[in-house]
Image: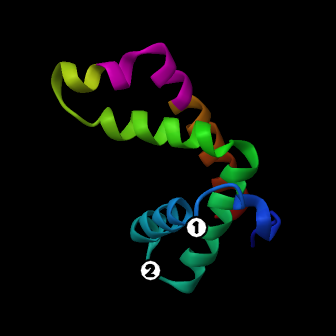
Amino acid sequence: MCVVTVSAAGDYPTVAVADYVYACMKANGETRAALESCSCSIDVIASIMPYERYEAAETFRSLGLQTGERGALFRESAPAKSADAELRRAQAEADVRCF
């Protein structure tokens, strides 16, 4: 059960929260329990990372999926690695608290 306040993701746009929960549910099962855990997860992430840093990390992660030199900048640069590490730490904390 989520231990973060309901308003934790208040600074995150609704569409970003919905996208996260949708993708999380696709990965963890489309059940009520998954909905609750995934909603808790984005609340925990929002309590750790401001939206601007979350958005940057997700952008680096998405663009880093491109192959070759195009994606290398978004996978291997210092800002990309730092943003990815911060997001991974937040997601790990969310996993511990919500799943």
Q: Nearer the viewer, residue 81 or 52?
A: 52
Residue 15 image point, x, y percent: 50, 65
Amino acid found under the numbered disc labelled 2 = Glu
Residue 75 higher or lower than 95, as above or below: above
Q: Earlier in the sequence, mark 1 or mark 2?
A: 2
Residue 31 image point, x, y percent: 50, 83
Q: Residue at x 69, y 47 (%)?
A: 93
Q: Give the number of the disc on residue 30.
A: 2
Q: Residue at x 75, y 73 (%)?
A: 1
Q: Residue at x 55, y 23 (%)?
A: 82
> Which element carries disc 2, helix, strand or loop?
loop
* Distance between mark 1 and mark 2 Cα atoms: 10 Å
- Based on the displayed image, in which of its 4 quarters is residue 61 positioned? top left
Q: Name the residue beneath numbered marker 1.
A: 38
Residue 17 image point, x, y percent: 56, 63
Q: Is residue 60 magenta?
A: no
Which quarter of the figure is the C terminus placed in? bottom right
The magenta span reads 73-83
Q: Residue at x 46, y 71 (%)?
A: 25
| Direction from residue 34 to residue 44 in the image, left or right | right
Q: Nearer the viewer, residue 74 or 11?
A: 11
